[in-house]
Image (spheres, rainbow, N blue to C red):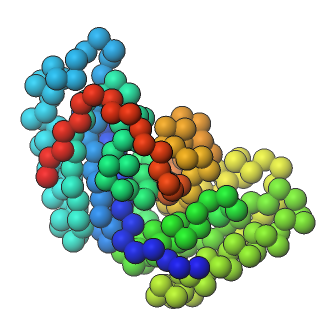
Amino acid sequence: MNVPDEPKVLVPLAVLDGESLAPALVAALSTVPVELVGYHALPEQTPPGQARMQFEERMEQELADLVAAFEEVGGTVETRIVFTHEPEQTFERVAVEESCDAVLLNNPAPVVEDVLVPLRGEVNVERVVALVARLLEATDATATLYHVADAEDERAAGRALIDAAVESLVAAGVPRARLTEQIVVSETPVKTLAEAASETDLVVMGESKPSIQERFFGEVSEQVSTQSVTPALVVRRLPAVEAADDGDGGKTE
């Protein structure tokens, strides 16, 4: 299994609503390029241009503070401001335009010491592994390669996935001592995964459907992040599906 280089992460934040990023997550993302999207979801009757005139300066200041936090730990970040009626379509469009490999589902993270890496057959394991390798480079965290099998006779398939991931991470320079493995059998995989995620600091997993829109509104990763209240980095499937432009999205460097 080859490990792709330089994964890029999309970080959408509703900064006007007070959403920010924990310092532990800023540090964990310091070794990957970050596309930081400050967004504000608008009522249907509010024109994006009107909202931009009213709130853009405040948004720029909020993002500037976050950029400074990234730069302080050696991170690379670009910013974009969007005022939109359809946030999920905006995230899809920006992810495609900026070639982002993963999207952050934000939750509080006082520390990043334990990373859970759920693996299943339909996700792009190579891309998940690439991001995990960079996160472990930025932190002293350990990673648990995790598979939920539907039945006992599916354990072998999970073991093959985990062994390949471990081999790739070690080849990428991750010390073997920082990796553990766990395979469980469950008839309620989402609940089981959410319970495991709640005991860790960060989840890195692949999306099981091709669009960020589906992921944000009901995909497995969203359920896990919501139920566990743990931040999750969701690695996008490729090729990406081009999304329609939702109308207003200016980029600031």
Q: Is residue 211 left or right of residue 137?
A: right
Q: Quadrant of the N terminus?
A: bottom right
In this rendering, the answer to whether 178 lies above or below 143 is below
Q: Is residue 61 left or right of residue 219?
A: left
Q: Observer-nearest residue: 220 or 181?
A: 220
Q: Is residue 47 visible?
A: yes
At which x and y percent is residue 15? Answer: 26, 38
Give the quarter of the image for residue 198: bottom right
Considering depth in this image, is 227 or 14 the residue closer to the camera?
14
Q: Can residue 224 be seen?
A: no
Instruction: Name the quadrant containing residue 81.
Output: top left
Q: Quadrant of residue 165?
A: bottom right
Residue found at x 22% / y 17%: 47
Looking at the image, the residue that sits furthest to the top is 45
| Image location (x, y in percent) of residue 89 | 40, 34
* Relative depth, front residue between 32 and 226: 32
Q: Residue furthest right?
A: 153
| Residue 98 coordinates in the image, percent (x, y) | 31, 53
- State the residue at coordinates (36%, 62%): 8
142 vs 12: above or below? below
Taking depth in this image into account, of 99 and 58 the one nearest to the observer is 99
The residue shown at (29%, 64%) is: 33
At x 41%, y 63%, the residue is 111
Q: How many marks?
A: 0
